[in-house]
Amino acid sequence: MRVLDIAIKDLRLMLSDKKALAIMIMMPIILTSILSFALGGTFTSEDSIGKTKIAVVKKYNIATEIEDFRYSLSNGIVSENISKSDLEKISKGVEELSIEKIFFKDFLDNKDIKEFLEYEIVREDEALKLLNSKKISAIVILPENFIYDMYTNFLTPFRNKVEIKVITHPDMNFKGRIVNGIMESFTDMTSTLIVGKNVLIETALEEDVIDKVFNNMNDVIDDITVNLSNNSPEIVYESLNGRNPISSFSYYSAAMTSMFILFSAGYGGKSLLEEKDNITYQRMIIAGVSRWKILVGKFFTILAFTLIQIFVMVTFSTFVLKANWGNIYIVTIISILAAFAVAGLGTLIAVLTYKVGNYKMTNIFESGIIQVMAFVGGSFIPIDVLPKFIRFLSNLTINGLALNSYFRIMMGYGIGEILKYLALLVLIGIGLMFISIYLFREKERYYYVERVDAENYETA
């Protein structure tokens, strides 16, 4: 009986096991789909950004706040040490300076921001509904007294604090941060203009030329508007070192694939003891099949099944989830070497399970060790956010090495950048296989003697 025959026999048995297929092929597909869609907001590529939709909530009453400001002017609340004629000029400035025009037309409708941001003005309750349904990425709330405080800041020597609140959806974290940054840029720009205006007024007061400032109030207002229009934030997307960003679909496709191939090692780890329990192992020995052929057959069975797992995941994620795996030839090399290392691990587990004589070893591996390896390797959480010690350990795990290799190819690196990972996968596979052979050797003499004794007995 050839090694190939043993491998084909075992592979047919594995593929006929519906439970095993569900766990090792269907489960990664389901989990990848769920995680990719659920956490898509934390992974964003330039091509997928598009326009960000926001809702703007106006909690102020513009007519009331303008009247309040005029009242404050006439009663000296925001006009201390300002002459009556200058107050009239400030009052006239209220008519010429439109705060809403500054925020909506000059800022949000600026051509650079409009390429990214799309807004609509709605009530607060409606905005929350839109955010919860993910129809918008963020809510921008203009607070009460927004108009009053902005007039005070622009037209008087005084300064009131204006806080623009941004509410974002947790699943749209990336776009939410950008919206928050844009609103911060607005407050930063207005603050700069207000500081400059206050310096101008203070200097004019010291030089006793304040009348000239208020006589040219129209020019001051025009300068404010022009500055806000011309100094809007510029949004530029750049990939680090020219590398491709990884989407949530690509990330979890590679992460789940790298994790679930470990279950092939666990499933294959039961095979030797199952052969013994079903008496097929003893029959092969009696039929003259070498124990090493049986062991090597198990190795190639796990190798083949692992490759089937990877092929299904890569195909599904590429055509259904539109994941970008990068150079398919290099991905194939990574997959073969990852399957080689997994086969070595599965063979070792099979030998240990056989020697122990029960399935506890395999059960411990599947229920505990795989979860630890998945965490350390970065299948659950991006490895970059984990402590340095765990990042080091990820390079000692099969799934961690495979995942790091896949990620680099997805980002556009060449095979030269992952040679160390590929070499480690080969060394791990060879090392585990040698350990398996060494441990399996101890049983060789026992079965050989048992077979010879049985033949001598029959001869006698």
Image (cartoon, rainbow, N blue to C red):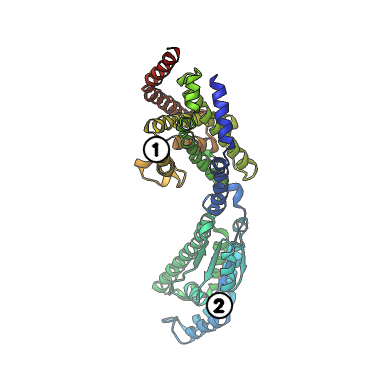
Q: Is residue 77 left or right of residue 322?
A: left
Q: Would you place residue 2 above or below residue 51 in this image?
A: above
* Relative depth, front residue between 452 and 225: 452
Query: Gap between marks 1 and 2, in whole Å?
Result: 80 Å
Tag 2 residue: 94
Point out which mark residue 361 bears: 1
Q: Would you place residue 180 above or below residue 412 in this image?
A: below
Between marks 1 and 2 in the image, the one whose residue lies nearer the viewer: 1
Point out which mark residue 26 bears: none
Q: Check disc 2: other Cα within 10 Å, few if <14, some if 14-19, many if 20+.
A: some
Task: Give x and y (percent) for residue 126.
Answer: 60, 71
Q: Residue type at mark 1? A: Met
How many numbered marks does the figure carry?
2
Label 1–label 2 contact, CB within 8 A: no
Task: Give x and y (percent) for residue 269.
Answer: 45, 34
Earlier in the chain: of badge 1 and badge 2, it is 2
Q: Residue furthest right?
A: 319
Q: Is residue 99 visible?
A: no
Q: Quadrant of the N terminus?
A: top right
SS of the residue at dot 1? helix
Q: Is residue 391 visible?
A: yes
